[in-house]
Image (tube, rainbow, N blue to C red):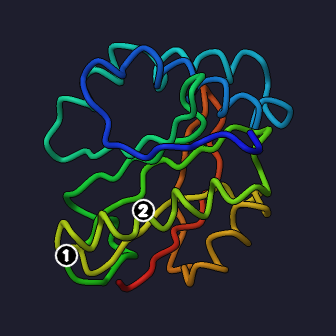
Amino acid sequence: MSGKTIRLRKGAPGDAERLARFGAAAFEAAFGPDNTPEDMASYLEEAFSQATFAAQLGDPASTFLILEDGHGIVGYSMLRSGDALPAVDGADPIELARIYADPRAIGTGLGARLMSASLEEAAAQGAQTIWLGVWERNTRAIRFYERWGFEKVGEKTFVLGSDPQTDHVMALRL
């Protein structure tokens, strides 16, 4: 990724297939080793299908920010407005529902660029609080969010396939 021009843009309906493919690969790279193949396959089929992404891209409550180089997507985030979990007490909340960078780009600043753009977009949409869920065993991501000022405000259950897992709920006042 070094030396390539990276462009940031908002997602559009025509991005569904590429986002689904990229998101599934990034999710599997991050969490596949710690989950059963059956649970991973079940979750990927549901959460990362082209139809799921097409519906999300068409939903006015969802905003996708995409980072791409000349070869394709290298990262994306998804913001989702609407109701927050009870643990999130800030005003006008927005959820950072997904944020993924190409696993080969970890440590290159792509994640920071995507987070910065996500926080700017959330503020531009009038949010005063941004929140997210992160697997309790994903210490690298938790440290990343803490560096940005997110604090743990609660927990929630996230079901991956048939496996109920615990996510930290983290929030940041904008």
**What is the crowding at mark 2: few (fewer than 14 residues within 10 Å), some, or many (at least 20)?**
some
Camera-side mark, 2 or 1: 2
Establish if 30 lies above or below 77: above
Left or right position of 129 against 44:
left
Q: From the viewer's side, name the closer residue of 97 and 63.
A: 63
Q: Name the residue under label 1.
A: 92
Q: Distance between the residues labelled 2 and 1?
A: 18 Å
Which residue is painted at 56% across and 84% down in the image?
A: 149
Looking at this rendering, what residue extends furthest in the right direction? 33
Secondary structure of residue under mark 2: helix
Q: In which quarter of the image is residue 73?
A: top right
Left or right position of 105 against 169:
right
The tag earlier along the polypeptide, 2 or 1, is: 1
Left or right position of 98 against 1:
left
Establish if 61 lies above or below 127: above
Q: How many labels does the image show?
A: 2
x, y percent for residue 103? 76, 39
Q: Quadrant of residue 16?
A: top left
Establish if 174 lies above or below 157: below
Which residue is painted at 69% across and 69% down in the image?
A: 144
Image quadrant containing the N terminus: top right
Kind of residue sitting beneath label 2: Ala
Q: In which quarter of the image is residue 164?
A: top right
Secondary structure of residue under mark 1: loop
Which residue is painted at 36% across and 22% down in the image?
A: 15
Q: Name the residue under label 2.
A: 117
Kind of residue sitting beneath label 1: Asp
Q: From the viewer's side, name the closer residue of 34 and 15.
A: 15
x, y percent for residue 87? 40, 76
